[in-house]
Image (cartoon, helix red, strand yellow):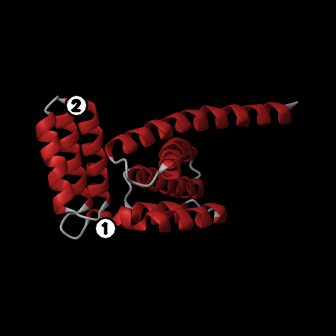
Amino acid sequence: MNDILAILLSLCSFVAVVVPIAFVTRALQRRLEARLPATLPYSWGFYFGCLAVAGGTLLGAIGGLATVASGLAGAWKDVVFNAGVTVFCMVQAVCGWFIIRRKRWAWVIGTILSINPMVWVANAIYGRNRWKEFAGIPYGPARTENEGYELLHVATKLEVEGRVQGALALYQRIVEECPDTTAAQDAQKSIESLRTRIG
């Protein structure tokens, strides 16, 4: 009977964590597509990052409580072990946050810390396809990734505010200043979309 309860509890915990993360992942992917339509999909990256944040934070909190409980009981070997687990989990949570933000260093460290050979292989393949995006290279030598995001963000904000001509001008500037880049592709799609809407 206890085995059945343990299995049901594990299943409920899995569903309680994984289902909300799936919804968050989908929302983050939609936001990325709206902001940068020409960028490769990043669903697995968002999922992996969210899972690291949720799991690392939850397990880190449990490890912290176990550390305190072990200290109060005078079990100093357990204190050291539990403190190590807590730090490990919190590092995973921090990496997860930066994986969501598409940082190369976080992708590498988070993958290694997953301690799962299947994740290592999957992330090696997935990360290789997005390696240049992690470093900001698709935005061209004249602009860093953050600058490309910033220009597109400003143009999108102008568009949302109804300042269509200003948005068009900025999108056009991105196309001209960053030819053959992801930013230019995104800007060109936005130009075409805007021109279709305004007739």
> Quarter of the image holding residue 183?
bottom left
Q: Quadrant of the N terminus?
A: top right
Q: Which amino acid, mark 2?
A: Ile
Disc 1 on helix, strand or loop? helix
User: Vertically, is 84 above or below 60?
Assistant: below
Could you tell whether 78 is left or right of 29 in the image? Answer: right
Numbered label attached to residue 60: none
48 or 145, which lies in front?
145
User: Vertically, is 170 above or below 158?
Assistant: below
Rendering coords of residue 116 (x, y %): 63, 62
Rendering coords of residue 147 (x, y %): 20, 56
Numbered label attached to residue 198: 2
Q: Which amino acid, mark 1?
A: Ile
Classify mark 1: residues with Cα within 10 Å, few (<14), some (14-19) or many (20+): some
Indicate which label's residue lies in the foreground, 2 or 1: 2
Q: Which residue is mark 1?
A: 137
The residue at 66%/62% (across/down) is 118
Q: Earlier in the sequence, mark 2 or mark 1?
A: 1
The residue at 24%/44% (across/down) is 191
Disc 2 on helix, strand or loop? helix
